Image (cartoon, helix red, strand yellow):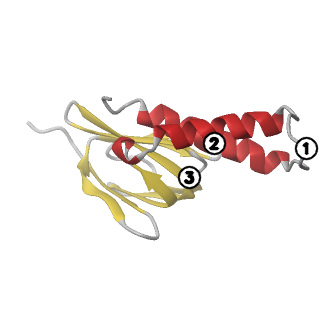
Amino acid sequence: MPEPRVFFELATPNRLMVSEEVEEVVAPAVGGYFGVLPGHTPFLTSLQSGEVSYRVGRAEQYLAVTGGFAEVRGDRVVVLADRAERPEEIDRERAERARQRAERRLAGKTDEEIDYTRALAALSRALTRLHVASRQPR
């Protein structure tokens, strides 16, 4: 007997990234990560930068997301992300430069005035992108 599934859609303002039946979805809400299996209680939440994973059978897929919203309703999960990237779409060198730049700003090693909230958000995005990129064979 096949495993129960939920219908998962993830879209950005520019494209539909995922539209398929899956066994499980895990995403980064503002209050922490949440997981959805079939029959989950409905809810709506804001997303933070982080990794979205979803499973079809034994195969897991990963995406780096930045901001947006997730809605769980019945056996359906809809994620509207500000930005999303697959591991193979991430430029590792660019993400590494962004991480270094954010860390320098947070350490006060620049002459510019620092907006710490923005610098922390930039560091979070860079670390997420590097983590998700590591999921792709080099």
Reading the image, the residue beneath label 1 is 111
Q: Secondary structure at mark 3?
A: strand
Reading the image, the residue beneath label 3 is 66
Q: Secondary structure at mark 1?
A: loop
Residue 25 point in image, percent of width and height: 38, 43
Reading the image, the residue beneath label 2 is 98
Relative to 132, is 90 above or below? below
Relative to 51, is 79 above or below? below
Q: Nearer the viewer, mark 1 or mark 2?
A: 1
**Structural distance between the alpha carbons of marks 3 and 2:** 15 Å
Query: What's the residue type where badge 3 is placed?
Result: Thr
Query: What's the residue type where badge 1 is placed?
Result: Asp
Image-quadrant location for residue 82: bottom right
Residue 133 point in image, percent of width and height: 42, 36
Q: Nearer the viewer, mark 3 or mark 2?
A: 2
Relative to 14, is 110 above or below? above
Residue sitting farthest toward the left? 1
